[in-house]
Image (cartoon, rainbow, N blue to C red):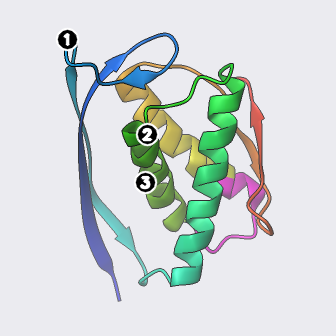
Amino acid sequence: MVITFSLTVHLILEKTAQSVVAPQNAIRYLEISFTSGTAEMMPSPDLERFATLIADNVVTAYERDRDGAPFHPTMRVTVVSVLVRSLLLVLPSPSSDVLATACNRGLDDVAGVIEIGGPRVAAVDPEDGSVTMRLG
């Protein structure tokens, strides 16, 4: 079975040096749109949980490596969602490199839109979902 999906995320935010926030006096509109993604089969709940675990680990490490500058909670959820989507396209995979590439693709999708740099994923442990970051 082939599944086609589409995801569009709309955010109101301001980019600052420390974090992404949405104050009332200075807002920007951001739309991230992904279309025409396909998957061979419906991901199992276990794969979704594992993808979410990896994505959360990536975002936590990303924030830590950016001198502890956390994302705004709404932006954090968006980044995790984009990473989960990227990971579900390659899971299940025993390859650390394949998982890291999927994570970096998701980070590039989001970071490129809001124009922030930062670390990238060097490796993902396919057994426990732990991540190793490298300078971006």
Residue 85, x across and y down, in percent? 44, 59
User: What amino acid type is highlighted by mark number 2?
Assistant: Pro
95 inside magenta stretch: yes
Q: Helix or strand or loop: what does disc 1 sit on?
A: loop
Proximity of marks 3 and 2: CB atoms separated by less than 8 Å: no
Residue 29, x across and y down, in percent? 19, 26
Residue 25 — which label? 1
Which quarter of the rendering shows the C terminus?
Answer: top right
Task: Give the residue at x 69% y 19%.
Answer: 67
Task: Give the residue at x 41% y 19%.
Answer: 115
Q: What stretch is highlighted in magenta?
A: 91-99
User: What amino acid type is highlighted by mark number 3?
Assistant: Ser
- Picture quadrant where residue 63 is located: top right
Of 54 and 136, nearer the camera is 54
Instruction: Report which residue position mark 2 lands on.
Output: 73
Instruction: Report which residue position mark 3 lands on.
Output: 81
Residue 13, x across and y down, in percent? 29, 25
- Name the outermost residue toward the front: 24
Q: Distance between the residues labelled 1 and 2?
A: 19 Å
